[in-house]
Image (cartoon, helix red, strand yellow):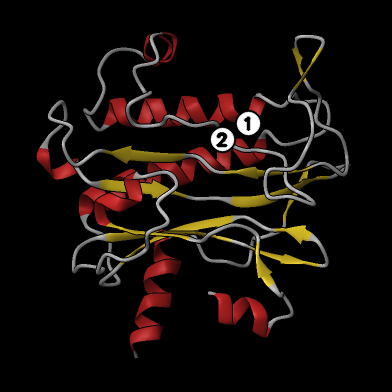
C-alpha cells in the first residue's frame, strides 16, 4: 500500500492502514496487521494517503480466495445496498444524519431478512438491536485531516450539507466470532465499504468510484490477478 501511494505522488499515509483478515475484520481499528490471510476468509482493508496535504480514506472488503461464500455474499450485499442508500442521501439541503439514517434502515432490514435479527425494522432501530453488528456512524468529515474539523450539529440540530463539503460514507456489519446469538455460519465475518464523497450542486460526486466494490467486479478482479 505504501509503495503504491508513493509511486503515485503521495509521501505519507493518512493514518495507519487497517488490514484485517477473517475475524480481525470485526475489529474497527485493527492495525497489528500480522495474522495470516486464510482460505475462505474475507480481508478488510481500510487505507488512505495524503496528497498535497489532503487526506483520503477508503475501505474495501474482498475474499482471500477470490470468491465470496454464500454467507459472505449475503452480508456484503446488505452493506453495499446500505452504502448506495446513504450515498443517495448526500445532497445539499439534507442534513448530516440523513445518510446514516438511510444506511441504518437498510442494514437493519437486511439483518432481519437474513434471520440475524427479528421483528420490525422500526422497532429494531428504536431498540438499537443493530448495535452489536453496526456500532459506528456512517461517516465523518474529510479534508486536511482524515477526521477533519467541523461541527456535526449546530444549535442542537444536525448540520445541513452544503456544496463543497466532503465526507466518508462507510456502513459495515461485524459478526463477532464469539457471538452465540447468531448461527455459527455468520460468525467472524466483518465487512465495511467506504468511499469519499463530495457534495455538489446536483447531489454528490463519489471521488473513489473507480475502485471496484460490486461483488462480480471484485471476483473478476481477483480472477484477473490470479491469472
For residue 184, side relative to residue 205 (left or right):
left
Q: Quadrant of the C terminus?
A: bottom left
Residue 135 location, quadrant: top left
Query: Image height check: is 4 above or below 199?
Result: below
Identify the residue under disc 2.
138
For residue 52, side relative to residue 68 (left or right):
right
Instruction: Determine the CA span between mark 2 and mark 1.
Output: 7 Å
In percent of width and height, residue 185 lies at: 13, 44
Q: Residue at x 34, y 31 (%)?
A: 133
In percent of width and height, residue 92 lies at: 83, 32
Within 10 angstroms of label 1, few (less than 14), some, or many (20 or more) residues? many
Q: Residue at x 43, y 41 (%)?
A: 172
Within 10 angstroms of label 2, few (less than 14), some, or many (20 or more) residues? many
Of 54 and 217, which appears nearest the observer? 54
Of 202 and 61, which appears nearest the observer? 61
Q: Residue at x 81, y 62 (%)?
A: 53
In percent of width and height, residue 141 lies at: 72, 40
For residue 154, side relative to residue 29 (left or right):
right
Q: Secondary structure at mark 2?
A: loop
In percent of width and height, residue 167 lies at: 71, 43
Of 2 and 108, which appears nearest the observer? 2
Of 136 and 92, which appears nearest the observer? 136
Q: Are marks 2 and 1 in contact (CB under 8 Å)?
A: yes
Residue 67 location, quadrant: bottom left
Query: Image height check: is 51 above or below 130?
Result: below
N-term-proximal mark, 2 vs 1: 1
Res 99 label = 1
Residue 55 location, quadrant: bottom right
Q: Secondary structure at mark 1?
A: helix
Query: Image height check: is 126 above or below 35?
Result: above
Amino acid at each position: 500500500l505504501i509503495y503504491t501511494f508513493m509511486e503515485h505522488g503521495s509521501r505519507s499515509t493518512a493514518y495507519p492502514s487497517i488490514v484485517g483478515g477473517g475475524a480481525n475484520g470485526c475489529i474497527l481499528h485493527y492495525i497489528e496487521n500480522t495474522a495470516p490471510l486464510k482460505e475462505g476468509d474475507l480481508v478488510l482493508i481500510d487505507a488512505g494517503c495524503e496528497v498535497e496535504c489532503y487526506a483520503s480514506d477508503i475501505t474495501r472488503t474482498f475474499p482471500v480466495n477470490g470468491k465470496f461464500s454464500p454467507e459472505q455474499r449475503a452480508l456484503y450485499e446488505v452493506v453495499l445496498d446500505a452504502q448506495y442508500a446513504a450515498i443517495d442521501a448526500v445532497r445539499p439541503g439534507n442534513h448530516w444524519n440523513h445518510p446514516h439514517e438511510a444506511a441504518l434502515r437498510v442494514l437493519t432490514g437486511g439483518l432481519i431478512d437474513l434471520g440475524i435479527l427479528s421483528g420490525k425494522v422500526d422497532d429494531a432501530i428504536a431498540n438499537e438491536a443493530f448495535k452489536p453488528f453496526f456500532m459506528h456512524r456512517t461517516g465523518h468529515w474529510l479534508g486536511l485531516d482524515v477526521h477533519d474539523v467541523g461541527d456535526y450539529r449546530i444549535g442542537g440540530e444536525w448540520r445541513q450539507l452544503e456544496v463543497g463539503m466532503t465526507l466518508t460514507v462507510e456502513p459495515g456489519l461485524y459478526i463477532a466470532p464469539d457471538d452465540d446469538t447468531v448461527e455459527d455460519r455468520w460468525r467472524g465475518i466483518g465487512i465495511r465499504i467506504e468511499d469519499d464523497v463530495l457534495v455538489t450542486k446536483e447531489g454528490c460526486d463519489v471521488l473513489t468510484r473507480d475502485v471496484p466494490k460490486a461483488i462480480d467486479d471484485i471476483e473478476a478482479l481477483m480472477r484477473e490477478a490470479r491469472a
